[in-house]
C-alpha cells in the first residue's frame, strides 16, 4: 500500500518568514514600552507601528515599488529603526549607507546599489553636495532633521525645497510621515526577497555589497535571541533590559540586535551621533543595561572623565568587530560591566559565536574569567563551524592546531551584489570562508589568532598579531595597541608594535618597558622569543577604519618603512 504525504488544508497559512512578523509579539505583549531618541523623539510601540505605516505610505507616494531601493544616511535614531521595518515590509530594499566612508566611496555605493530614494540627515548635506552631480540614477531625496528643526526655504524644507547642497528635496521626514497612512496594510510575499543591502569596508579595492533576505534576517533574529537567553548568571538579554546600540545601524543592521530588541519589546534608546559624554549620560539617565560596541568605543567610554561619575555595574556589553584585549576587559570588569566577546562578519549578518560562560566558569578567578570573556566564543545555534587546512580538511580540535574558519548558517549572505566571481570565492567548497585563522579547543571554544592577511610571517614562523596585541595590552601603561608585520631584509617580516599610552603614563611610557613586559613571558616559557617585537613606537593615535577597527593596511603603508625604534 503506497504512502502519500498529507495535504495541508486549502486555507492553511504557510507563514513566510517576513520582517513584519517580528512585530506581532511586541504589539501583543509590550505595546506601552518606549523607543526614544537622544534628539528628542519618544514613542511607544503602538506609535512605532503607526509610524511604520506612515513611512511606507509616504514612500508609496514617492513611487517606491517592490524591488526598488531606499537608502538611509542618518545617525542611530528612531527613524533608522522605522526604516529597518517599513522599507523591507513593503517589498523594497533598504540600503544602509556607511556615512563614514569617503565621499567617493559613498557615491560608488549609491550608484552600485541603484538607489531610488535617499533619506539624508542635514549633517550629511555637504557630502551630498560633493557627489550629487555624479549620481547616475534619478534619485528622490527626503530630508531628515532633529529637535523639530525645519530648515528655511533656502536650505530645503518642504516639498520642492532646495538645500545648500543644490539637492531638491521631495519632503522633510516628519512632514512626510504626517501625511502618510498609519494603517497602511502589508501583504505577504516571497521570504527569499532581498530586504537589505550594505557595503563592507574592506581595506583593499572598492566596497563590496552584502545583501540579506527576509528569511535570513528573521532567522538571525531568533538565533541571536536564543543565544542571548541560554546562559544563566551573565550575558543575558531579557525583556526588562534597556537597550542602546553603540555600533552604527548602517553596519550589519546594528549587528542585528535592534531587530532582536524590537521582537522582545524591550525599551530602546537611540543615541544619535556617538560622543562618549552623551553615551554615558544616556546610560545613566535612561538606565541602559544592554549594549554592544567595538573595543575603541569601550576604551573611549572608560577613559572619559565622566565615566567616574556613572554607575556602569548594570551594563551587559558585547564587544566585537575586533579582538578585545585582556587589559581592556579587566578595566571593564573593574567597573562592573558584564563584558564578553562576540564574533561575526559583515557577510554573516553578523552572528557566529559569543564568549558566554557557564555557571562553573563564573566561579573561577577573575583572571580565568577574563581569558574566557576574551575568547572568540562558542558557535550559536544553527551555526556549523569548522576549522580547515589549505586542502579543506578539518584540523584537530586540540586547542593548538590552527586553520581557516569556515561556516554555514541559515542567515549568511549568499554572495556579493553583482560580483559572481567574488561570491564564488567566498563560498568555495560549499562553506563561507571567513578569512580568519583560529583553533577550537576540546571545550568547543573558538579562538581567532589572526586574519589570514594580517599574520606576521617571520623567518618561516607565523606570529599572531592578535596574540601580540593581547600581551602588550596587559601592560599597565598601555591604552591601545596594534601589531603589524613590516619588511625585514633577513627574516622577511618582523613585528612592529604601535602603542597609545594610558593617560597616566603619557610622556613616560617607553618601548623598553613594553619589551621587558613581553620578555617576561618568554622567560616563563609561555611564548617564543621570536614574538618579542624588534620595534615599538609610542604614538598619539592608531588609525581606524570607518567602523572603528584598527586599519592595518593603512598602518603598514604608514609605518612599513619606519626608521629605528626611537625607544
Image: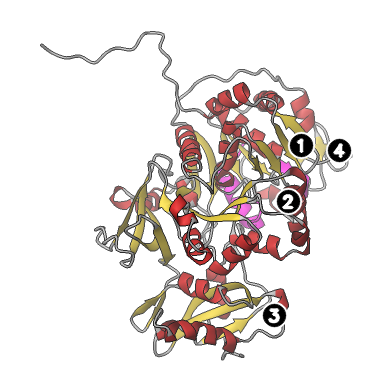
Residue under the image location 39 percent in, 87 percent down: 491
Query: Gap between marks 2 and 1, in whole Å?
Result: 23 Å
- Please tell me how crowded label 3 is: few (under 14), some (14-19), or many (20+) other residues with Cα within 10 Å: some
Mark 2 secondary-structure assignment: loop
Disc 1 or disc 3, which is closer to the eye?
3
Q: Nearer the viewer, residue 442 or 178?
A: 442
Disc 3 or disc 4, which is closer to the eye?
3
* Label 1 sits on residue: 169
Q: Mark 4–mark 2 contact, CB under 8 Å?
A: no
Query: Gap between marks 4 and 2, in whole Å?
Result: 19 Å
Above or below residue 506? Residue 357 is: above
Disc 1 or disc 4, which is closer to the eye?
4
- Please tell me how crowded label 2 is: few (under 14), some (14-19), or many (20+) other residues with Cα within 10 Å: some
Residue under the image location 86 percent in, 40 percent down: 151
Magenta extent: 98-124
Mark 4 secondary-structure assignment: loop
Mark drawn on residue 273? 2
Above or below residue 191? Residue 445 is: below
Counting residues from the start of the chain, the first of labels 1 and 3 encountered is: 1
Q: Percent x, y for residue 231? A: 47, 45
Image quadrant holding the N terminus, namely top left
* Label 4 sits on residue: 150
Mark drawn on residue 505? 3
Q: Percent x, y for residue 12? A: 40, 12
Q: Is-magenta flag for residue 233?
A: no
Mark 1 secondary-structure assignment: strand
Counting residues from the start of the chain, the first of labels 2 and 1 encountered is: 1
Amino acid at each position: 500500500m503506497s504512502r502519500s504525504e498529507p495535504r495541508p488544508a486549502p486555507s492553511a497559512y504557510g507563514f513566510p518568514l517576513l520582517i513584519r512578523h517580528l512585530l506581532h509579539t511586541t504589539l501583543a505583549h509590550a505595546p506601552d514600552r518606549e523607543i526614544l531618541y537622544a534628539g528628542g523623539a519618544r514613542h511607544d510601540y503602538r506609535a512605532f507601528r503607526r509610524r511604520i505605516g506612515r513611512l511606507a505610505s509616504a514612500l508609496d507616494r514617492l513611487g517606491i515599488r517592490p524591488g526598488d531601493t531606499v537608502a538611509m544616511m542618518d545617525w542611530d535614531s528612531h527613524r533608522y529603526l522605522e526604516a529597518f521595518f517599513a522599507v523591507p515590509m513593503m517589498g523594497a530594499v533598504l540600503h544602509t549607507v556607511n556615512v563614514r566612508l569617503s565621499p567617493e566611496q559613498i557615491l560608488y555605493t549609491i550608484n552600485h546599489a541603484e538607489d531610488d530614494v535617499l533619506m539624508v540627515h542635514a549633517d550629511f548635506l555637504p557630502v551630498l553636495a560633493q557627489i550629487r552631480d555624479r549620481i547616475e540614477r534619478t534619485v528622490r531625496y527626503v530630508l531628515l532633521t532633529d529637535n523639530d528643526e525645519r530648515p528655511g526655504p533656502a536650505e530645503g524644507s518642504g516639498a520642492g525645497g532646495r538645500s545648500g547642497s543644490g539637492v531638491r528635496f521631495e519632503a522633510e521626514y516628519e512632514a512626510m510621515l504626517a501625511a502618510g497612512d498609519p494603517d497602511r496594510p502589508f501583504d505577504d510575499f516571497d521570504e527569499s526577497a532581498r530586504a537589505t543591502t550594505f557595503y563592507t569596508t574592506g581595506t583593499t579595492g572598492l566596497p563590496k555589497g552584502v545583501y540579506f533576505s527576509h528569511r535570513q534576517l528573521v532567522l538571525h533574529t531568533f538565533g541571536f535571541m536564543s543565544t542571548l537567553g541560554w546562559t544563566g548568571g551573565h550575558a543575558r538579554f531579557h525583556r526588562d533590559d534597556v537597550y542602546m546600540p553603540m555600533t552604527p545601524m548602517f553596519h550589519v543592521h546594528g549587528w542585528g540586535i535592534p531587530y532582536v530588541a524590537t521582537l522582545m519589546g524591550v525599551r530602546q534608546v537611540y543615541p544619535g551621533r556617538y560622543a562618549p559624554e552623551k553615551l554615558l549620560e544616556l546610560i545613566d539617565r535612561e538606565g541602559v543595561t544592554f549594549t554592544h560596541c567595538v573595543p575603541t568605543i569601550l576604551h573611549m567610554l572608560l577613559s572619559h572623565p565622566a565615566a567616574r561619575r556613572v554607575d556602569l555595574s548594570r551594563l551587559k556589553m558585547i564587544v566585537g568587530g575586533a579582538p578585545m584585549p585582556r587589559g581592556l576587559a579587566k578595566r571593564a570588569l573593574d567597573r562592573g560591566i558584564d563584558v564578553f566577546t562576540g564574533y561575526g562578519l559583515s557577510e554573516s549578518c553578523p552572528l557566529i559565536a559569543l564568549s558566554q560562560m557557564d555557571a562553573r566558569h563564573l566561579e573561577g578567578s577573575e583572571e580565568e574569567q577574563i581569558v574566557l570573556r576574551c575568547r572568540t566564543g562558542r558557535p550559536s545555534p544553527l551555526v556549523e563551524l569548522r576549522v580547515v587546512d589549505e586542502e579543506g580538511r578539518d584540523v584537530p580540535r586540540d586547542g593548538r592546531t590552527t586553520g581557516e574558519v569556515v561556516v554555514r548558517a541559515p542567515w549568511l549572505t549568499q554572495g556579493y551584489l553583482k560580483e559572481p566571481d567574488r561570491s564564488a570565492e567566498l563560498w568555495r567548497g560549499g562553506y563561507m570562508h571567513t578569512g580568519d585563522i583560529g583553533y577550537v579547543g576540546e571545550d568547543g571554544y573558538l579562538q581567532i589568532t589572526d586574519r589570514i592577511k594580517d599574520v606576521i610571517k617571520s623567518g618561516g614562523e607565523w606570529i599572531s598579531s592578535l596574540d601580540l596585541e593581547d600581551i602588550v595590552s596587559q601592560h599597565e601603561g598601555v591604552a591601545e595597541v596594534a601589531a603589524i608585520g613590516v619588511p625585514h631584509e633577513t627574516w622577511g617580516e618582523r613585528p612592529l608594535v604601535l602603542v597609545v599610552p594610558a593617560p597616566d603614563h603619557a610622556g613616560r611610557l617607553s618601548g623598553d618597558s613594553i619589551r621587558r613586559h613581553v620578555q617576561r613571558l618568554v622567560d616563563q616559557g609561555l611564548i617564543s622569543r621570536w614574538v618579542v617585537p624588534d620595534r615599538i613606537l609610542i604614538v598619539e593615535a592608531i588609525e581606524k577604519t570607518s567602523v572603528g577597527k584598527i586599519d592595518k593596511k593603512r598602518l603598514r603603508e604608514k609605518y612599513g618603512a619606519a626608521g629605528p625604534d626611537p625607544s
